[in-house]
């Protein structure tokens, strides 16, 4: 990430909106914004396949595994405004292959910390987890978008829900229904 370019761009934005980038309250704003982008867009530096490379094969577990209410914070690529909410991830292991508990939230963050669309984010998480070769994966995200809350139609509290179902969760109604019961 090129912090110097970001600093220059933020300075130009301040000037363009009629502000004085040299006034006390704004003097360090370009640097603060550059550091913020480096942090909240850090997902570009991470590789989901490396995160998921830690697996366990001896646990003999072959039932649904769910991580519920994983907090997500991302940036809408259309308006560069945040969206935030919760992500629920489930997978059904095959051949007793499970991943470390912390790996799933790390994969969620890897993709969320990029400029995103919620629909794409949901699919990227699901597709990434399918690399573990489970019987199925389900990802559900519910999020509030500040581009819908602060501007445009101004509808605070509105949540967008997206889902991505893969494998058995897509094909088998009984398994999908069990997942939905567990998520309630």
Image (cartoon, grey):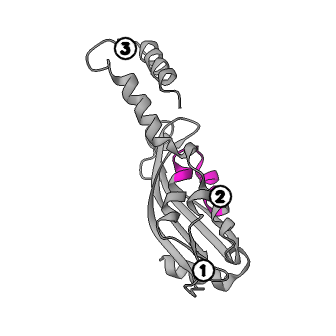
- For marks 1 and 3, the one nearer the N-term is 3
Which numbered mark, 1 or 3, is in the foreground of this view?
Answer: 1
Residue on which disc 2 sits: 123
Q: In the image, residue 139 lies at what x, y percent?
A: 58, 65
Which residue shows up at 63% across the image and 65% down it? 129
Residue underneath mark 1 = 57
Location of residue 54 with respect to 97 vertically, above or below: above
Question: Residue 167: x, y in percent?
Answer: 72, 74
**Badge 1: few (under 14), some or many (20 or more) residues near its Cα, within 10 Å?**
few
- Disc 1 from disc 3: Cα separation: 59 Å
Magenta-highlighted stretch: main secondary structure?
helix
Q: Nearer the viewer, residue 175 or 49?
A: 49
- Vertical placement of residue 51 versus 58, above or below: above
Determine whether 26 is above or below 158 in the image: above
On the rendered structure, is 121 left or right of 172?
left
* Label 3 neighbour load within 10 Å: few <14, some 14-19, many 20+: few
Nearer mark to the viewer, of 2 and 1: 1
Q: Which residues are magenta?
A: 110-126
Residue 6 at least partly seen: yes
Q: Is residue 13 above or below residue 178?
A: above
| Nearer the observer, 146 or 111 | 111
Please provide percent x and percent y for residue 40: 46, 42
Mark 2 or mark 3, whichever is nearer to me: 2
Q: Is residue 69 magenta?
A: no
Q: Is residue 159 visible?
A: no
* Residue, far left: 24
Circle 2: element type = helix
Q: Is residue 175 left or right of residue 59?
A: right
Q: Are marks 2 and 1 in contact (CB under 8 Å)?
A: no
Circle on res. 19: 3
- Asked whether the residues under the numbered discs 2 and 3 touch, taking CB atoms below 8 Å apart as contact, a structural biologist would say no
């Amino acid at each position: 990430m090129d912090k110097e370019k970001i600093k220059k761009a933020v300075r130009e934005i301040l000037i363009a909106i009629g502000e004085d980038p040299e006034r006390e309250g704004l003097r360090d704003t370009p640097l603060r914004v550059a550091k913020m982008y480096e942090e909240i867009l850090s997902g570009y530096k991470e590789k989901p396949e490396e995160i998921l490379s830690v697996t366990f094969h001896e646990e003999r577990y072959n039932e649904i595994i769910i991580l519920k209410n994983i907090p997500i914070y991302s940036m809408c690529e259309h308006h560069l405004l945040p969206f935030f909410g919760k992500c629920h991830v489930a997978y059904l292991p095959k051949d007793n292959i499970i991943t470390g508990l912390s790996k799933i939230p790390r994969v969620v963050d890897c993709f969320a910390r990029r400029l995103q669309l919620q629909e794409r984010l949901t699919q990227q998480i699901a597709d990434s987890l399918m690399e573990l070769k489970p019987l199925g994966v389900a990802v559900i995200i519910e999020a509030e978008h500040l581009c819908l809350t602060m501007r445009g139609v101004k509808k605070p509290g509105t949540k967008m829900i997206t889902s991505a179902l893969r494998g058995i969760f897509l094909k088998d109604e009984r398994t999908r229904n069990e997942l939905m019961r567990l998520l309630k």
